[in-house]
Image (spheres, helix red, strand yellow):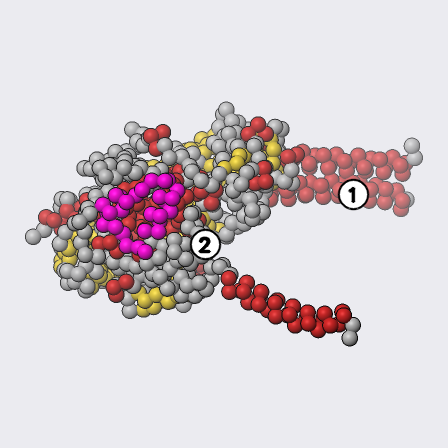
Amino acid sequence: MTSVSRMLRRGIPSFTVAMALSFTGAAAFSTAPTTEVVPVVRGEAVVALPAAEFGHELEAKIVLERDERDSIAIGAGAELRLSVKNRFDAEARVTYAVEFVDEFGFEVDRPAMSDVFVVPARDSAPVEIELPPALEEGFYLARITVAARSGDESADDMIEQGLGVVDGEALLLTDEEWLEWSNANGGF
Amino acid sequence: MKNEAISKIVAPTIGAGLGAVAGLVLFALSAVGGAAPSTPPAPVPATPARPGHAAMVPEREGRGDQEPAVPAPAPAPAERAAPAALAERGFERRTIGASDPLPRDEGEWQGMLVDQSIRAACDTTARCGLAMACVEGACGACVTDDECGAGEACVLDHCVPERNVECRTRHDCRGEELCVLSGYSDDLRGNGSMSAFCRPMDGGDDAEAETPYVAPPEDAEFDPRPVRVEDLLERLDGAP
Amino acid sequence: MKTRTKEAVRALLLGALAFFTLSTAAEAASGVVRGRLRFYQNQGNYCPSSRTCTAARYRQADYNINSPVRDVKVYLVAEGGGVLGQGTTNANGDYQISWYKFTWWGGSPGRARIEWYGEHRDGRFALKTSAGGRWVFWTPYSTLTDGTTASNRQNLGTRTWGSSSSPNALANLYDGAVRMWRDALNSSNRMRNSFTGVEIRAYDGTTCPTSCANGANKRIIIDSSTSAYRPQARVMHEMGHIASYLSKARRACVDYTFGGNNGWSMTSQEWACAGFEEAIATFFGDRAIYWQASPQPTSCLSSGVCPNSSNVETSTGSGSCAAGEARQPITAVRYLRDLYDSVDETNDGNRFGYSRFFDALARFDNGSGNRAADEPWNWWGTSLDDRDGRSARDFRAHIEGLTGSSTSSNYTNNCSPTGD
């Protein structure tokens, strides 16, 4: 056996092991952040956020929850059905105000304020907003602002509910749809 | 006879035809008028008069905080009926597509990337705002100094006054410093006071006294909202 | 000349005449326009006149007035499409644009309007739709006047977005981001070098029910139009998260479940990593409204005025801390605020410049060891193994290392925020 072949017989296995070790070590020592999704328990549901996400932000202690329907038939008795949720640990005294404007900001109806009412701790109450009866085709915005006091603490929330009225129906728009379709983003 | 007819009819026709083609080309150019974003023609509303101040809510008489997380919201519906219904009625969307920033070497400063999706029409570089160069009839990023105006240099895709150029790339700077642009200025070209310089990572402007608060102009009229959170809280305080 | 040749020459001359006639009919129009853009200011969290607003950058006098749309890119867009010119607004909302357009038969240049898309003039950030497209803020069309010049500009007037009866939430959101840049982040060289091309997507309440930020993607998601009126706890706070990430890239603290509660509030008890992360983002954002000499900086989630109880300058004081107060994010916020402010300097002699806080974050080493950027995570980055790591205590070590100053008094006077 030549000296070269002897060297190869010894060298190749050693080289192979060395390379395998170095690759393994490089992989182990890698510190690049992963995009591992780590489940986080939030309330009754698990919300998964990527590891690079920051987002468990503050939530108000009084929250208005939207009407989940897609549309409402226009006419007598037509109303938005929202709810107000009290997240204080004690009962809260609550009041809200309602404004109706068109897509150019003109009032459709006078702003109105509700009576003060009480919502028990960690409980909800319905908020029913009657729509103006004779809305012509076009775009409108119902803005509902709520405020609450519980002991020494206070909180507030607001919903801007866009409406697209077509064929006697008020389509309930998302915040994006309101901006996409109406003239709300016009400067005058 | 036949040759004369050809001479009298065909030749002038060819000549006029060439002229017509040239005219059509120029007409087409004028109709285009420069690269445009995909903004659909929007319905033109009549300019409304400003809404008058809303009537005060009766009983205007006289406070926000945080909360641990709450249940995850209900998932959004798979399809929304509203967009289809509105499109059917002829309403138009008022958004445009994403911007298209011109990439720059990763090692360089990533600020003020030039948006290639919007290019204004131009005849000369002097006409272009945002420190752009006029290239093939449209304002856009420069590549060479020649594309910029007299006395300007092309740095980080922008035309910068030569007198204000300290660097062109980070390799002209030391250590961790980056070659950066100071930002657009208010003149028509957008580069009158623009400079290219090396900026370190550490430090900054911490001398707050040098930047005092500026009150709004006196003619800025206070126009209160008809509904304010403070009004609602006062109502809560006043009610039994 | 032979007849045939004459005919050919005549034809060519006729053609040339036609050519030049048609070509001179295609002309160009150009000019300069100017104008002003404003919006109705309805963001909460201003310093009310009932308080001492020394060093406050956003005050009651700024609220519910027509304010300038500042520092935005603007475009002159022809009716039917085509961008004719571009420029930016200044701090007063004023712009001027040089424009150019081909016309035909010497006709008028037609009508055009101003559009803006919520893009910061220097590319610091830009508003986007939830899908990454751009919102169009537009004006009515105006007839352009050909031949105007820089010294004789055509005035397109003042245009305002929103009113007292109907504020424009998106314009308010844009302004909140501008304020955060101008009055906070722009003080730091690290942010001037790094805070570029940040997307602010509005609105998406499904992906992020209360808004969120992704540092690696430089993306903020704002959940709803309501959040546009609560700048401190939303857009400014989220920009603070991006800023802290850009100072030092690292994995997020994803566990907010300390003590069984979920998410966080200023007074909830949290793992030290989560508490500090929220505190630093809050501190960064609060500075957009309250500078060093502010005696009563407040911080809250509200579209109105923050209550007095949300004051982040006051401290419970060493020895008077309530049980669990060390784990409350407000404790870490107060510690950070004390390092920065120039108020109540008894036993609190530090007054670090705002830019130092970003530089202190940059001193966290890579890795998952003590005082390192990924300390809460295991070596492989697959799970959390030290939820009290990368805390206010770790930050304290780095800012003391940077400044050479002890912050022991600031730390203990503010109930010693938890950390190992």
Chain of the residue that carries numbered disc 1 in the rendered image: B
Q: Position of residue A36 (x, y in %)?
A: 44, 65
Chain of the residue that carries numbered disc 2 in the rendered image: C
* Residue where numbered disc 1 is placed: B13
- Residue sitting farthest toward the top: C151
In the picture, measured across the screen, residue A9 lies left or right of residue C399, that is right
Is residue B151 shown in magenta?
A: no
Q: Position of residue C147 (x, y in %)?
A: 55, 28
Q: Residue at x 53, y 34 (%)?
A: B197
Crowding around mark 2 (Cα neighbors within 10 Å: few <14, some 14 to 19, many 20+) is some
Is residue C399 shown in magenta?
A: yes
> On the rendered image, what quadrant is the C terminus of chain A found in?
top left
Q: Which mark is residue B143?
A: none
In the picture, measured across the screen, residue A160 lies left or right of residue C243, that is left
Identify which residue, C235 or C246, lies in the foreground.
C246
Can residue C382 be seen here? The reply is yes
Residues drawn in magenta: C393-420
Q: Residue at x 36, y 29 (%)?
A: B210
* Residue where numbered disc 2 is placed: C366
Q: Quadrant of residue A119?
A: bottom left
Of the two numbered discs 2 and 1 in the rendering, the one whose residue sits closer to the viewer: 2
Alpha carbon separation for disc pair 2 and 1: 78 Å
- The residue type indicated by label 2 comes to Asn
Say what secondary structure mark 2 lies in: loop
- The residue type indicated by label 1 comes to Thr
Q: Residue at x 32, y 58 (%)?
A: C388
> On the rendered image, what quadrant is the N terminus of chain A found in?
bottom right
Can residue C251 be seen here? The reply is no
Whether B143 is drawn above or below C258: the answer is above
Identify which residue, B71 or B176, lies in the foreground.
B176
